[in-house]
């Protein structure tokens, strides 16, 4: 019986950054793990995980039918050659076209709907097309994992999955032994430090974050707004390097670049801000809360799952700069002892509900039963 397992994603960066411990757990249980994704600078890191890598070109931004048919063909050729025992699919195109290809070859599929992306931010033809493709591609999946209740309910109401297929898990989870609280930064008269952590995209509310920081400074509140994350993201919502440089020149934000280890930056921050329009379950918030940081985020799918409003941080309406300013002002004026208490409660919630071992156990269980059944 084959012990090969293919994990398909839209970037190798995603595979290494969010699935490393899942890969390690699968290997520890005797599986031969194969990562399938477009090539980027993270390919070398897969070798360190004992994960064999297969490069598949993918147009992540486009919707051209010919390019997507090419992707389907590449998946089919790869899966026919490798004959894996199962496919673990993540992100929209691997979930759709990878599942199609695996289905044609009789390979069990386990999907993870890790956020719905721009196709679900507003009604339109893109949304209708995504629904149609999901409905067909997921119909024979052994399990479809969802990262928040909103996405799960949406797919059930729309008939895109069956109730017996679907299960909610806590996102990618977080390694609570790796992301641990550190002493709060000494104030020493320094400005209050807000940190945005994530890909720099308009849909993640970066524009609202910068606007809110500007208003706080105009009010005389001593604060810094920091950005930590990728520039030059291949996404229609990507913020240009020129725009970020303009914000830096105006002294509106401090751009910290990108870091593989974000813990030092989280430790130095007083509050994490993510005004995103929609998420699966944002890893940045899980990591921040696991390190005992209060959070300001939006009352939207994925984000609201992490924060207890008024207890571990604050929830605000999306695209609402006034509400965001109010929440950030409240946090900046909160006494350090109360901020510390919010952080402790955030950590407790993460340990109880979002430990990544919950996610890994769910994968090992369905994978074992899927291989045995088929």
Image (tube, rainbow, N blue to C red):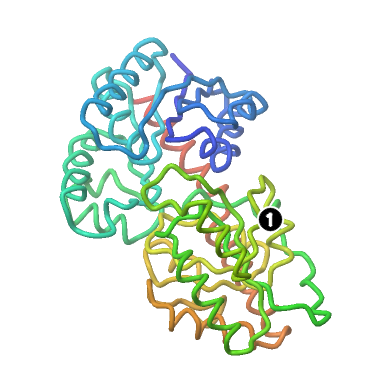
Instruction: Decide: few, some or many residues near mark 1? Use Cα within 10 Å; few <14, some 14-19, many ≥20.
Output: many
Residue lying farthest to the top in this orientation: 81
Q: Residue at x 50, y 45 (%)?
A: 232
Relative vertical location of residue 269 with respect to residue 35 in this rendering, above or below = below
Relative vertical location of residue 326 with respect to residue 204 in this rendering, above or below = below
Q: Residue at x 63, y 83 (%)?
A: 332
Q: Position of residue 178 (x, y in %)?
A: 70, 51
User: Quadrant of the rendered structure where residue 352 is?
Assistant: bottom right
Residue topped by disc 1 = 179
Observer-nearest of 108 and 233:
233
Observer-nearest of 268 and 155:
268
Q: How many marks?
A: 1
Q: Position of residue 282 (x, y in %)?
A: 49, 57
Observer-nearest of 107 and 210:
210
In this rendering, position of residue 293 left or right of residue 320 = right
Relative vertical location of residue 228 with respect to residue 212 in this rendering, above or below = above
Q: Position of residue 190 (x, y in %)?
A: 77, 78
Relative vertical location of residue 14 with respect to residue 306 in this rendering, above or below = above
User: Quadrant of the rendered structure where residue 164 is?
Assistant: top left
- Which image quadrant: the N terminus? top left
Q: Position of residue 35 (x, y in %)?
A: 50, 26
Q: Secondary structure at mark 1?
A: loop
- Which image quadrant: the C terminus? top left
Q: Residue at x 64, y 28 (%)?
A: 49
């Amino acid at each position: 019986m084959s012990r090969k397992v293919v994990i398909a994603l839209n970037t190798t960066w995603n595979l290494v950054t969010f699935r490393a411990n899942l890969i390690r757990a699968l290997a520890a249980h005797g599986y031969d793990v194969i990562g399938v994704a477009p090539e980027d600078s993270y390919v070398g890191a897969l070798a360190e995980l004992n994960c064999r890598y297969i490069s598949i070109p993918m147009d992540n931004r486009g919707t051209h039918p010919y390019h997507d048919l090419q992707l389907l063909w590449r998946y089919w050729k790869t899966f026919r050659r490798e004959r894996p025992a199962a496919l673990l699919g993540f992100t929209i195109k691997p979930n759709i076209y990878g599942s199609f290809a695996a289905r044609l070859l009789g390979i069990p599929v386990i999907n993870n709907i890790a956020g719905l992306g721009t196709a679900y931010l507003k009604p339109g033809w893109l949304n209708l097309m995504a629904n149609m493709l999901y409905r067909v591609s997921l119909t024979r999946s052994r399990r479809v994992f969802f990262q928040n209740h909103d996405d799960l309910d949406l797919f059930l109401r729309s008939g895109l999955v069956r109730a017996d297929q679907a299960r909610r898990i806590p996102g990618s989870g977080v390694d609570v032994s790796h992301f641990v609280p550190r002493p709060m930064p000494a104030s020493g008269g320094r400005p209050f430090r807000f940190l945005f952590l994530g890909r720099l995209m308009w849909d993640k509310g970066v524009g609202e974050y910068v606007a809110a920081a500007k208003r706080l400074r105009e009010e005389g509140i001593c604060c810094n707004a920091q950005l930590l994350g990728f520039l030059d993201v291949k996404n229609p919502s990507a913020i240009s390097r020129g725009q970020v440089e303009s914000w830096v020149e105006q002294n509106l934000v401090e751009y910290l670049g990108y870091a593989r280890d974000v813990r030092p930056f989280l430790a130095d921050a007083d509050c994490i801000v993510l005004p995103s329009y929609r998420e699966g379950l944002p890893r940045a918030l899980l990591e921040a809360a696991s390190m005992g940081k209060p959070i300001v985020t939006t009352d939207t799918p994925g984000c609201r799952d992490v924060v207890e409003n008024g207890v571990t941080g604050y929830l605000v309406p999306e695209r609402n700069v006034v509400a965001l300013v109010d929440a950030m002002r409240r946090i900046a004026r909160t006494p350090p002892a109360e901020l510390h208490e919010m952080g402790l409660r955030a950590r407790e919630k993460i340990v109880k509900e979002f430990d990544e071992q919950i996610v890994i156990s769910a994968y090992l269980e369905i994978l074992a039963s899927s291989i045995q059944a088929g």
